[in-house]
Structure formats: structure tokens, C-alpha cells
Amino acid sequence: MKRLSYLAGLLGLAAAIALVVHEGWSTICSTIDHAGWTLLWLLPFHALPLLLDVFGWRVLLAPRDPERQATIPILFWIAAIREASNRLLPVANIGGEIIGIRLVKWRGINGAAVAASVIIEVLLTLINQYLFTALGIVLLIEMTENIGTLSSVLTALIASLPLPIFLIVLLRHGKVFTRLESLAEKLLGGRSRLTELIDGTRLDLEVRALYAQPLRLLAAGAWQFLGFLVGSFESWLALRLLGYPISVWDAIAIEAVTQALRHIIFVVPAGLGVQEGGLVLFGHMIGLPAEASIALSLVKRMREVAFGIPALISWQWAEARRLRAGWRNGTSSGLSNTRDV
């Protein structure tokens, strides 16, 4: 799987470079130069959809955090690290969630409760992705009356629909993590640090406890879907700054179907080539020139780097600070024990 991911990444990068060369690097650069430093507005703007996602996550965490140790600012910082890890690091789009669980646990919240909130949040994100894509396809059909190209995306989306349905039923009625813990014990020859970290029985109970609160799930899902809608305005704003203004509905449509394409071809790291090709394809439907679509993709990637790198640096700084504090405490404890002896 790792080799397949690397191969897919190389092919995607080659496809992205081919698109840039075909449309002309100088043309794309001049399009980006047209906006200049005003593109920096995309950085603070991205904080808004991320904050809406955090509100949804906070709703899921609230029952297990009565003392509000995981505040909105803390969760926003962690959400930025989660997003940056999944977008910029080779972690197969799950490493960010594991990092997020670790960082929230620093606030003194039970690990199983934190993991359950992240698992349900990811499941809700998957459901909202389908709803958002359906909205985008409807808008594109309505605006362009082009069903042929979109039918393949719709078919692929429908074909993959049984997976989230299966996950919903399995997490609700199955003992997924208890079985995983038992399997790990068999493979490792008994209890170990890994199986203690999984704590399958407790995690299954926490997941079911969240399932038993439909209003809380609905509220979290609503915040997430609002985040999807607001996030599509990034394309609207970027294209306006690049000199290619489009309508709000156009922005929602191309954002939704491009995200769907990245979701379907998930094996390609960071959607290299997939995002660029999708924006060229669907942008053409709404009358957007290919160079503008590629420029939009490159601007989005620049924003990911500019927003994500500081988040990753802050995470490493926090990890190093915690490690130093633990080392000092361990040293002090050792000196104290020596004096006692």
C-alpha cells in the first residue's frame, strides 16, 4: 500500500506538472501576479471554516469534558495541526487524527472519550462530504445542463456509498475496537502497551454513548456542513483576486465536485494532479479558462503550506517543551530518591 501511494503520488505530480506546462507556466504566473499580495487574505479567511469544524468537534467532546479543559482556542490549534498533518505529511489522511487525540489527552480528558469524538467526527465528515458533493452536482447540472461528465462522478459516488453505511452500522452495533484489541493481544502474545492504549471495550462504549445522542450528532454535523459551505468561498475569493470573478453557486459547485474527485481517488497523496485536473475539468463547465483553474489550484496549495507549516512547527515546539519538562521532572525525582537513600 505504501509503494502504491508513492507511485500514485509520482503519477499525480507528473500529471500536475504536465497541466502546468501545457497551459504555460508564464501565463499561470502572470495570473497569480495579478492578485499579488492580496492573496494573503486567504490565510485569515481559512480560519473561519476551520473554526466551524472546531465548534462541531467541541459539541461531541462536551459531555466528557465538564470542566471545559479543551477550550475552543486549544481545539482550533489542534485542528490546524490535524489538517496540516493530513495535507502536508505522508500519514495517509489518518495521522492527523491520531496526533489530535494525543494533543487533546494532554488536557486531562480520557483517551477513549477523545478517540470516540474524533471517530464520530470523521464519520460525520464522510456523510457531509456526500451531501456536499450531491449539492455540487445538482448545481452544476442546473447551471450547465451537462450530465454526461458528471454522471461518472455520480456513479463513482453511489458505488462508494455502501462503505459509510457499513461503517455507521458497524460502529453502532458491532464491537469493533474490542475485537481489534483482542486481535492485537493474539498477535503480540498478550497484554502490551499498545493494547492498553487501544482500550477497545471503553472505546466501543464511548462511541455508542455518542450514538445515543442524536441531537448532539445533528448539531455537530450541521456545524461541519456549514464549514463545507463557507470553505467553498475560498475558491470564490481566490478567483476574484486572480481576476476571474465567479458566482457563489459556481464556487460551491466546483469546490464540491473537486473534493469528491479527491475523495474517490484517495490513494493519491494530497490529491496531486487530481485537484488540478478536477478544477480544469469542472472549471471549464462554468466557463473558467484552464490557466485560471490551475492558478486557483496552486494558490490553494500555497495557502495549505503557509497555513500548515506554522501549525506543524508549533506542534513540534509543544512536543519538545513537554519532553524537556518530563525530563526535568524525571531528573528531579531521581535526585530526590538518591537523597532519600
Image (cartoon, grey):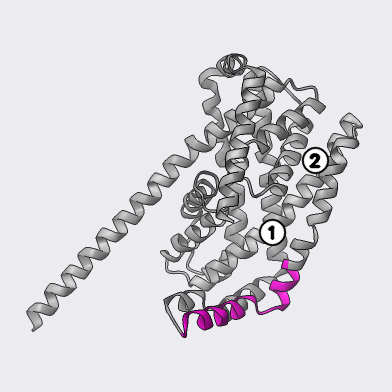
Residue 251, picture quadrant: top right
Q: Residues within 10 Å of mark 1 (few under 14, many from 20)?
A: many
In the picture, the disc for residue 89 is none
| Cα–Cα gap, marks 2 and 1 | 18 Å
Q: Is residue 32 above or below residue 59?
A: above
Q: Nearer the viewer, residue 34 or 192?
A: 192
Residue at figure coordinates x 62%, y 24% from the top left: 20
Q: Nearer the viewer, residue 257 or 208?
A: 257
The residue carrying mark 2 is 136
Instruction: Give the amino acid at mark 2.
Output: Gly
Q: Nearer the viewer, residue 313 or 241?
A: 313
The residue carrying mark 1 is 124
Main SS class of the magenta portion in the image: helix
Q: Mark 1 falls on what kind of element?
A: helix
Q: Mark 2 falls on what kind of element?
A: helix
Q: Is residue 178 magenta?
A: yes
Residue 212, picture quadrant: bottom right
Over which residues does the magenta segment extend?
167-190
Earlier residue among tags 2 and 1: 1
Q: Give the image location of residue 6, x and y in percent.
A: 56, 47
